[in-house]
Amino acid sequence: MTCTWAAGARWGMRIPRPKGTARPTRADMWLVGGLVVMAVAVSLAAPASPPYRGLDAAGPGLALASALCLIWRRTAPELVTVAASLILAANAAAGYAATVVQWPAWIALFTCFSLTGVWWRRGIGVAATVLAVGFYIALDREPAGMLELSGITMCFLIATVGGDAARSRRVRAAAVEARLLSEAREREAHAERVLIEERANLARELHDALGHAVNVMVMQAGVGRRVFADNPSFSHEALTHIETVGREALDELDRLVRVLHPADRTPSADLTDLSLFDLAGRVQAAGRELDLHIGQVDLEAGGARAAYRIVQEAVTNALRHTETGRIRVGVAQEGAAVRIEVLNEGHGFPEPRPGRGLVNMRERAHLEGGEFFAGPVREGFAVRATLPVRAAART
């Protein structure tokens, strides 16, 4: 199959011109064979009458040479048009009738217009054809009448207009194919972005859920080890909390794994799990005091999960980076926004370093259309987030 190479600026794309080859295509071979058979049949069935030359070797030879030129019509359409036009002029000069020998010239002109949109290449084909027709009219042994001139004009229009229409159809087909290919690539790129986003979401869930559990277990194990000799009952309580947190961490891991299976999806944790999670008891088991104040809020499912993870990660960071001080958690709805604050009381906190925990919290808040702040304040180190309430609640 051959495609055009001059798509034009109107399509905004580049279509390569077909590369030539020394081997003719099967279609061209059938075309040449058909013209050869037609030339022989016409020469034998309807020999020319005076004033034209009769049947001899030269006449069919010119028809055969004209037909054979079309073998290379896709490789060099301009040169083939020139060659076929010269043969047509030579045929008229030799005194033969322009029967079959004229058709390769028109076919070559059609090919020239169908394979290229460059004006000078088309100009070569038009100039060669016009000169050949002029020589034919001037040298033909019978004067050209209106019928012959009308036929020549019609053949010229069919070759040029039809060739340009064929090229335009191929250009449009190539443009449609390119558009479909571009859309397919865009869909593939979108699927890739969705996959990357899903992986990032899973990584964030694993970090927030399991990271919190591991940090709490480490804190409680450290406290239990330090007071083991002096307060065995407290150490026993810490071990109980470690076991509980470990089991819930395994449940959380199992939930995240099941999320990967489309047929077995379970709801993610949301803000209502904070009371069930017994966050205050776990922080106290690690030797810290936690004030937890959660009001009634109206959040979307995604916003509730984001709020839950922000509180969980902020408390985890407070346990990880400080050993003393009270941790205060407040969640309340104010108008069209839910305000979250986790305050780690103390003094001398440095500016936060952009670790994975802070990045995850900020991303969660921004993905839900909210705002996020983390940094030292007068009372200590604060993590504050604002999330929009459910759409139905705002109307």
Image (cartoon, rainbow, N blue to C red):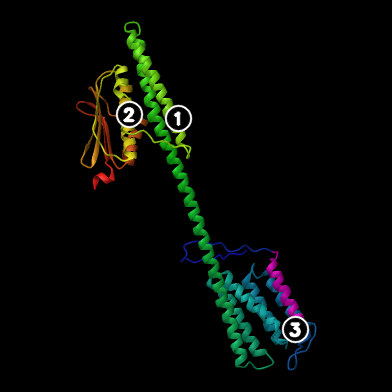
For residue 312, which numbered disc appears in the image? 2
Q: Is residue 36 magenta?
A: yes
Count of numbered badges drawn on the protein: 3
Q: Earlier in the sequence, mark 2 or mark 1?
A: 1
Height in image: 374 above or below 175?
above
Query: Tag 1's secondary structure?
Result: helix
Q: Residue at x 41, y 29 (%)?
A: 252
Q: Earlier in the sequence, mark 3 or mark 1?
A: 3
- Residue interval drawn in magenta: 22-41
Circle 3 residue: 42
User: Label 1 crowding class (10 Å Cα cut-off): few <14, some 14-19, many 20+?
Assistant: few
Query: Tag 3's secondary structure?
Result: helix
Q: What amino acid type should be assigned to the residue bearing mark 1?
A: Asp
Q: Residue at x 20, y 26 (%)?
A: 379
Can residue 6 be seen here? The reply is no
Circle 1 residue: 254
- Distance in Å between CA atoms under marks 2 and 3: 95 Å
Magenta-drawn stretch, dominant element (helix, strand or loop):
helix
Q: Residue at x 49, y 59 (%)?
A: 179
Tell whether label 3 touches label 2 (CB within 8 Å).
Answer: no
Height in image: 177 above or below 217?
below
Q: What amino acid type should be assigned to the residue bearing mark 2?
A: Gln
* The N terminus, quarter of image: bottom right
Looking at the image, is mark 3 or mark 1 nearer the viewer? 1
- Distance in Å between CA atoms under marks 2 and 1: 19 Å
> Which percent across, then down, holds residue 289?
26, 20
